[in-house]
Each structure stands twice: as structure tokens, then as C-alpha cells.
């Protein structure tokens, strides 16, 4: 028999559309999907690497997960065009990490990704939120006001 990886590749056609060059709508070339798994693994994949499929299609692979891992969140990033978006990741046990989206590497659809949130063995990603540059500025002003009040 074949390996699990070979079976999964057969399910999604075994193709690795990393070199896909389809017509990209104006402004869509900078858009990416930010994908985070429950084990704190994440990556960005350029949106142009996902071909449009029919409604009844099985879809295409977005990330290669380790056994027992699954996708916790997917967000479209790059919409602000400034590169200043930030991501907040929170675990079930209250571990929180805030970083710039641009620090999370852009990879192929079939890559496993990189560690974006370090977790204990019995912890997992609970929430992922993306903040635009404007939201970041509002949060900083709120922080400043809170410091003035206290």
C-alpha cells in the first residue's frame, strides 16, 4: 500500500499549484490566506495559488497538517495594502502572542508552516484575530488613554 501522504495527494489531484499564474484581479496579487492550526503552526499562502473550483468540488489542500492537528483559523490578509497588519493568537490556557502578519512566512499550499504560537502539550489555539493598521492605531490610543486615567 501507499503512504497516507500519497493517498492525500491523490485526493487533491497530486498537483502542486505553486506556479499557477492565472488572471489576478486588480489588488488581489497582494492578498494571502493566513492559516493557523490548533497546534500553533501557521503560514501565509498567496491567494493566487488557489484556483477557482466548482461548488461540488472537493477543494484543494491549503496546509499539510501533522497527525492530530487541524486548521483552527483562516483569514484573508493584505487587504490594507500597508503591510502593517497584526495577528493576535490566543490559546485555551490563556497564552497570547501578538505579531506582525509580515513576520509569518509565505509558503506553498502543501508546506507544513512554521511555529507561530508556542504551546504546552495539553494546550491548543483557541482564537486568531487579524488587526489592520487602523485598528492597531485605535488600540494604541486606547492604551494611552488608559495609562492617563490610571
Image (tube, grey):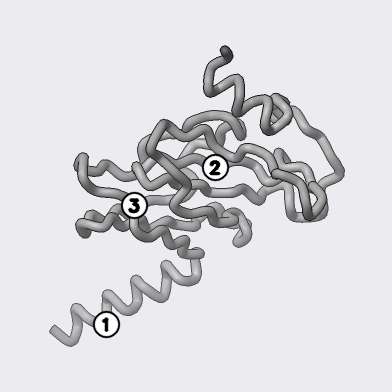
Residue located farthest toward the right when viewing the structure as drawn? 23
Left/right placement of residue 75 relative to residue 17 reads: left
Few, some or many residues within 10 Å of mark 2 (<14, 14–19, 20+):
many
| Labels 1 and 2 touching (C-beta < 8 A) | no
Q: Residue at x 53, y 53 (%)?
A: 74
Residue 49: give x, y in percent of width and height. 71, 38
Residue located farthest toward the front when viewing the structure as drawn? 1
Q: Residue at x 67, y 48 (%)?
A: 30
Mark with earlier residue (3, 2): 2
Q: Secondary structure at mark 1?
A: helix
Residue 101: give x, y in percent of width and height. 47, 49
Is 75 in front, or is 31? Answer: 75
Q: Nearer the viewer, mark 1 or mark 3?
A: 3
Task: Classify residue 26 by image quadrant.
Answer: bottom right
Residue 63: give x, y in percent of width and height. 54, 37
Where is mark 3, residue-wise? 125
Left/right placement of residue 137 relative to residue 14 reads: left
Where is mark 1, residue-wise? 145
Q: Secondary structure at mark 3?
A: strand
Image: 109 above or below 53: above
CA separation, marks 1 and 2?
34 Å
Q: Residue at x 54, y 42 (%)?
A: 44
Residue located farthest toward the bottom when viewing the structure as drawn? 149
Is 84 in front, or is 66? Answer: 66
Q: Quadrant of the C terminus?
A: bottom left
Task: Classify residue 107 by image quadrant.
Answer: top right
Residue 83: give x, y in percent of width and height. 54, 52
Left/right placement of residue 17 relative to residue 87 reads: right
Mark with earlier residue (1, 3): 3
Where is mark 2, residue-wise? 44
Q: Residue at x 41, y 75 (%)?
A: 138
CA separation, marks 3 and 2?
17 Å
Amino acid at each position: 500500500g501507499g503512504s497516507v501522504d500519497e493517498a492525500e495527494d491523490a485526493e487533491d489531484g497530486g498537483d502542486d499549484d505553486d506556479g499557477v499564474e492565472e488572471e489576478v484581479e486588480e489588488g488581489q496579487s497582494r492578498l494571502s490566506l493566513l492559516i493557523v492550526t490548533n497546534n500553533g503552526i501557521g503560514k501565509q499562502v498567496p491567494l493566487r495559488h488557489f484556483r477557482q473550483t466548482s461548488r461540488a468540488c472537493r477543494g484543494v489542500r491549503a496546509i499539510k497538517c501533522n497527525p492530530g492537528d487541524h486548521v483552527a483559523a483562516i483569514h484573508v490578509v493584505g487587504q490594507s495594502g500597508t503591510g502593517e497588519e497584526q495577528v493576535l493568537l490566543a490559546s485555551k490556557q490563556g497564552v497570547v502572542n501578538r505579531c506582525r502578519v509580515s513576520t509569518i512566512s509565505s509558503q506553498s499550499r502543501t508546506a507544513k508552516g512554521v511555529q507561530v504560537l508556542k504551546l504546552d502539550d495539553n494546550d491548543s489555539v483557541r482564537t486568531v484575530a487579524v488587526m489592520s493598521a487602523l485598528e492597531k492605531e485605535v488600540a494604541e490610543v486606547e492604551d494611552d488613554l488608559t495609562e492617563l486615567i490610571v
